[in-house]
Image: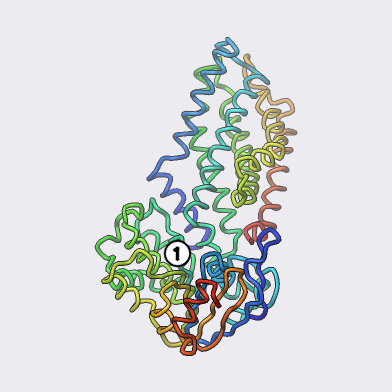
């Protein structure tokens, strides 16, 4: 078994045993949707507002997961154990990106239907929305894994992670919101401009995956 | 290692540390709290970069060729480096996969047996007592058959029976060098071929044959009188 698969299997096994991340994310999203529903005083959303509410919720739920994954690894000495092994650190990066993507996908399987029940009049755009969310998840996971690895060894990690992470995630949110907006129109999905935003999102994902792959070895060094 | 220096925020934690250790030999490191003993082990384990000086571990110059030494070092520090939610066996399996251990099942069973953990191997690590946790960490340290053992207070939390088990597991072996940090002066000096004594300021008070350094002198160094 490759180190990548070993780290991935270890993280998934730990999550299945402790249920620390995904249930917390799901609970957070349900609470957020309730707050939006009463805060906006609307029982139906569409277009940019619907996209904004959904993606803001996904973003903050992702930050919960990113913190959990990396703080646990640090607290239990996982980074040291992995660095003592003859393992390329990029295996750790790729495994963490995959773990975060799986957490986000599992979370969205719960959160998106809840969002649709709370706010949407039509579910016609949801299949295409799944593709948008998948690309957004890749960006969140690739950037989150990179920034958290920098922040986790710092005493001010609670401050550094959001300060570095949120600005870097702005393009992901812009791309995802741009692509999701026409899918969430009240009179059914439209695909005008959809391809352009998907391309922006995919390009940003590719850039950060490559940056992470290239620099992760150096980030883990003291 | 020649003239090693390690700084934390401009403060020198270790300075002027020079020693050499041949395969199969044992070096005991003593010194008061804060003298840099654990930092020294972490540098040798490739987990920390030296701030200055030359360090070569198993023929690999650090930090440039740390990758060449990794996987050949067994490091037992203050933390067990085990995941609390996984069982002892799952932790060992995980480490075996990282290190690419051949015949991992046989090796794990042998170590768990020798460490007296065979019956607790399927329990989550969080359920283990401190002594059992230390024994599990020792199994992790030895799993991949390291050529260099770096041991920071290996007898911590162990009762007399467990100490004997651990001494046998971590004892001298052909071709396996050991660096042991300990506060047990008599035991540590008796087990070692050479000794390194560090002062509170992180400089070297003594380096040389362990047989030449008396426990009394070692105690004086620890208490800052020498």
Q: Residue furthest front?
A: B225
Name the residue tied to disc 1.
Answer: B95
Chain ID of residue with mark 1: B
Whole-percent x and y of residue B79? 46, 60
Q: Is residue A104 left or right of residue B203?
A: left
x 61%, y 65%: residue: B48
Residue B161 vs residue A136, the one in the foreground: B161
Whole-percent x and y of residue A112? 52, 27
Residue A46 vs residue A57, the one in the foreground: A57
| A204 in relation to A54, above or below | below
Whole-percent x and y of residue A134? 59, 38
x 41%, y 83%: residue: B191
Q: Secondary structure at mark 1?
A: helix
- Indicate the colouring scheme: rainbow
Q: Residue furthest top?
A: A41
Q: Is residue A222 visible?
A: yes
Residue B145 vs residue B104, the one in the foreground: B145
């Amino acid at each position: 078994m490759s180190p990548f698969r070993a780290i991935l299997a270890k993280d998934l096994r730990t999550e299945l045993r402790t249920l620390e991340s995904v249930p917390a994310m799901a609970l957070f999203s349900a609470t957020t949707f309730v707050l939006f529903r009463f805060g906006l005083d609307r029982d139906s959303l569409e277009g940019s507002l619907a996209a904004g509410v959904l993606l803001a919720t996904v973003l903050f739920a992702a930050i919960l997961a990113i913190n959990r994954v990396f703080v646990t690894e640090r607290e239990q000495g996982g980074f040291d154990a992995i660095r003592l092994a003859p393992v390329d650190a990029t295996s750790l990066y790729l495994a963490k990106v995959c773990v975060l993507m799986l957490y986000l996908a599992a979370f969205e399987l719960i959160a998106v239907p809840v969002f649709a029940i709370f706010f949407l009049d039509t579910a016609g755009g949801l299949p295409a929305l799944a593709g948008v969310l998948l690309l957004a998840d890749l960006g969140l996971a690739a950037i989150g894994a990179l920034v958290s690895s920098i922040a986790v060894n710092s005493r001010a990690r609670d401050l550094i992670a959001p300060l570095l992470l949120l600005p870097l995630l702005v393009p992901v949110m812009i791309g995802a919101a741009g692509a999701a907006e026409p899918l969430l129109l009240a009179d059914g999905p439209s695909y005008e401009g959809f391809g352009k935003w998907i391309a922006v999102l995919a390009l940003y994902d590719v850039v950060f995956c490559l940056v992470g792959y290239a620099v992760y070895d150096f980030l883990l060094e003291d | 290692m020649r003239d090693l220096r390690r700084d934390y925020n401009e403060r020198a934690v270790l300075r002027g540390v020079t020693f050499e250790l041949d395969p199969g030999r044992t070096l005991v490191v003593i010194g008061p709290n804060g003298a840099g003993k654990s930092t020294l082990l972490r540098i040798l384990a490739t987990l920390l970069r030296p701030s200055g000086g030359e360090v070569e571990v198993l023929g690999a110059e650090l930090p440039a060729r740390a990758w060449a030494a990794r996987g050949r070092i067994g490091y037992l520090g203050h933390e067990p480096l085990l995941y609390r939610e996984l069982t002892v066996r799952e932790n060992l399996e995980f480490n075996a996969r990282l290190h690419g251990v051949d015949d991992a099942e046989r090796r794990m069973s042998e170590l768990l047996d020798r460490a007296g953990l065979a019956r607790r191997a399927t329990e989550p690590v969080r359920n283990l007592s401190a002594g059992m946790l230390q024994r599990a960490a020792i199994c992790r340290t030895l799993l991949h058959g390291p050529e260099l053992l770096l041991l920071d207070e290996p007898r911590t939390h162990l009762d007399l029976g467990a100490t004997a088990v651990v001494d046998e597991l971590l004892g001298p072996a052909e071709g396996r060098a050991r660096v042991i940090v300990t506060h047990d002066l008599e035991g540590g000096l008796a087990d070692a071929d050479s000794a390194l004594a560090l002062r509170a300021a992180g400089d070297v008070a003594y380096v040389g044959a362990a047989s030449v350094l008396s426990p009394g002198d070692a105690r004086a160094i620890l208490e800052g009188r020498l």
